[in-house]
Image: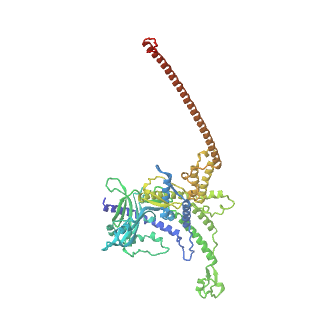
Amino acid sequence: MDDEKIVTILQKAISDSEHITDGRLSRERQEVERYYRGELPAPLHAGDSKYVSRDVFDAVDSMRSTVLEAFLAHSRIVNFSPEKGETVDDAKQATDYCRHVLFKENDGEQLLYDVLTDGLMKRFSIVKVFGEELTDDHTYEFEALTEDELTAAVADYPSYEFNEAEVTPEGLFSGSFIVTNRKRRVVCEVVQPEDILISSRTTKLCDAKYLIHRMTKSKSELLKAGLDKSKVEELTFSASFDIDKNYEKQSRFEVVDDMFSNNDAYQGAVEEVTVYEAYIDLDMEGEGKTQLWKITMSQDVVLHKEQVKRKPFAVFVPLPVPHTFFGENFGKAVIPVQNARTVLIRQIINHALITNNPRQMVMTGTVANASELVENRIGGIVNVRRMDGIAPIPQGQLNPYVFSLISMIDEDKEEVTGISKLSQGMNKDAISTQNSQGMVEQLISQSQQRQKIVARRFGKFVRELFGLIYDTVIDFVEEAEYLDVTGNYVPVKPADWIERSAASIELSLGYGDQQREAMKWTEIDQYFRTDPQLAPAYDYTKRYEVLRRGLELRGVEDIESFLTPPDKLPPAQPSPAEQLQMEQMKSQIEYQKAQAQAMIMKGESDRMLAQAALIKAQADASHKQADSVIEAKRVENEIHIGREELRIAETVPDKKATFAPDI
């Protein structure tokens, strides 16, 4: 689809929705705002009392204060639940960083205040969440540096650009370079209701076929946003006068400026132009399937187009009407009450004025100078010719039913708004020493039912807002850090976060309900600890979680400063009695071990003695055996010798010996 076709589609959508936004809805919002400021109703006659009953302001302010207190009184209004594959600490870190984005990087309290005000007075309010990259350029000069010195000078800066540089004959560099610091952040911005263009047939924001954000941008802002410079140059920066003449916008400044201003620019770079940022379902490829596109257009020029995942808006409708996007106007419902009370109280005031300073009947010729009577200043002199020529005009009595009528109107106001004097602490009949605190709290709680419904609608919006912040952080922020309650900077990497589908809202309507909720957790802790059957299953980890919730409800955030988490708890140390018992058991064990060792040593000694005796016996037996062998050998040798001698004797001839001495 070409740009010309896109422009045709957007022009048709803008034309269809502008007559709704700038028509009946705009007139209604202007009227409610004037009643809110106490400008209406105007006096019926000149000289009448100009008193205005501020019922619209009172109703809007009471509802806003109650609902806002219900959220800001709680330290953690939103908590992300752990998803599959995620720890409790990961979910807590995501919760803390999203709270940091809303309340630190953005003015979260003012944002919620504005959202409630717009929602109660203009049928709906809407917040836009988007990523913004901030750039800051600094110029640094250098002179007579060598190449190595210049390299070292720019090494500390991740992004730099040489502006100008000169090289001397000696090879030294002089000049300057520009360092660009970039910072990404998530912006939460309340959009003025008259700048939202949407179809009158829309029932839900997520189902809207298109949603267009109408705004004014200067030439400088468009270029800083990274738009094509050639397309920006095609625009004529004079159309901003039309949107500035929007009567609804001008009505906000009537108190201080009753002149229309065309915002004449002092430079061409700050001249403004009307820009339409449209989120629309388009079939760009002609395949019959639409996808969500973000189209930025001005004066028939498509400045930018890209496919996006979601509409970056969260909407709050305090009094929704089924099957339509636009809810009821809370402030408009109180206008009849303000008109009636104002008229009645003005009549009471006018009657008192006339009674104290009545109009006079004057006979012709009685007053010498009529202007003296008309001036009616205190202590003024009136020259008369006769005393009986002047008389006050008879004044009728004030109807006593006027005060009853005012009371009836007050009751009607309570029924319309759901805000009673009891819930505001102004009913002296209910809030007295005769009624117990519990009874008073019960009456107040019952009188706040409609406020609680609006608070729950606001809680749904806050949950959607946090989910939108979470998704935008994942898409836009790679690395960041935030300051936790202990004063330490915690680094986060949103790029590693998982897609989230659940978030819980902690809603407590005022400090009384919050204290009762904290007391509930205290009672749970006492019950679990004292119950003999539950106590074994109620360990330190579970008790820490119960106490943590109770302390957070009491406004204590830095819990780890005085209560150690279970995962950081050191090993349990025994008591002195247990330690003494352990020492005695240790001594007894050591004694038993020594006895066992002694027995082992004695057994070893006996074994060694037995072994020595065995060896001695074996040695003695060996000696005896050796002696026996020797004796046997000796006998055998003797026998052998005897046999040999016998044999020799048998072989030698038997000769007798002859004695011959004379031979």
Number of dots carrying numbers: 0
| Camera-side residue of 331 and 558 | 558
Q: How is the image coloured?
A: rainbow
Q: Compared to 66, does 640 lie above or below?
A: above
Name which quarter of the figure residue 602 lies in. Answer: top right
Q: Quadrant of the N terminus?
A: bottom left
The single residue placed furthest to the right in the displayed view is: 434
**Measured from the top left, where is residue 642 in percent x and y?**
48, 16
Figure quadrant of the C terminus? top left
Position of 646 relative to 183 (above/below): above
Q: Nearer the viewer, residue 343 or 144?
A: 144
Q: Is residue 397 visible?
A: yes
Residue at (55, 29) in percent of width and height: 616
- The answer to which of 171 and 4 lies nearer the viewer is 171
Q: Nearer the viewer, residue 480 or 448?
A: 480
Describe residue 74's horizontal placement relative to residue 149 as left or right.
Answer: right
Does 194 sit above or below residue 255? above
Displayed quadrant of residue 351: bottom right
